[in-house]
Image (spheres, rainbow, N blue to C red):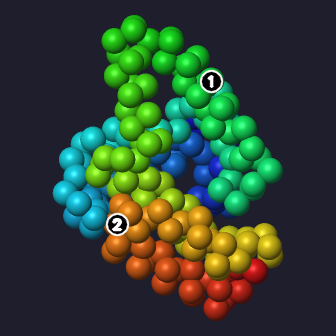
Amino acid sequence: MKAVLRQSHVAAVDRPENDAEHSWHLALMAIVLAEHAAEPVDRARVVELLVLHDLVEVYAGDVPLHDDAAMVGQAEREVAAADRLYALLPAEQGARLRAAWEEFEAHVTPEARFARAMDRFQPLLLAWMTRQEADPEITAAGVRERLRIIEDGSPTLWAAAQALIDESERRGYLG
């Protein structure tokens, strides 16, 4: 996971975040911010979903949220990666971990909705902290549209996300 680089940059360091760091950041954020979930959640389950959700990127790679061309076929690549990854484990364990990955992807449980919200909020927070300049074609309206799923998991985090988007637009970080 350390070899899978993301578009976000690490705060206070001029380099891209990797998937291992992303998972660690999300796990810590979930522990601290779980009280802001839209519904009561099992913190341990949220952390498990967050730690497991990007493992498939070891084989499928990470695709930036705003790269529509790269998103084409990504779901299929991730399913193929999950098939390959979870087959490496004993059958029962592989099935259990695969089910957790599928739970995150489906985001139908309170834990999965909150985990998905955290997964969308964290890159926005990193971009804000690093004053990462976005592609001028990425607009505040486009960011809001792609991050709106945060509201399903945490209206509180959605309000914070909107404030960050507004301020990013005001400061010229968004096109």
Residue 10 against residue 112 in the figure, above or below: below
Judge from the rendering whether residue 94 lies leftward or rightward of residue 30; answer left or right. Answer: right
Where on the picture, by quarter, is residue 103?
Answer: top left
Instruction: Measuring from the top left, give residue 72's x and y in whole percent.
Output: 74, 44
Q: Which secondary structure, mark 1?
A: helix
Q: Which secondary structure, mark 2?
A: loop
Mark 1 Cα shell of 10 Å, populated few (<14), some (14-19), many (≥20): some
Quarter of the image with the N terminus in it: top right
> Between marks 2 and 1, how big is the CA–CA gap?
31 Å
**Which residue does the numbered mark 2 point to in the structure image?**
154
- The residue depicted at 65 percent of the width and 56 percent of the height is 65
Instruction: Measuring from the top left, give residue 46's x and y in whole percent.
Output: 31, 46
Q: Earlier in the sequence, mark 2 or mark 1?
A: 1
- The residue depicted at 42 percent of the width and 58 percent of the height is 118
Instruction: Measuring from the top left, give residue 157's x and y in whole percent.
Output: 38, 71
Q: Which mark is residue 11?
A: none
* Residue 158 can be seen, yes or no: yes
Amino acid type at circle 2 is Ser
Instruction: Measuring from the top left, give residue 2's x and y in whole percent.
Output: 59, 37
**Which residue does the numbered mark 1 point to in the structure image?**
80
* Residue 16 can be seen, yes or no: no
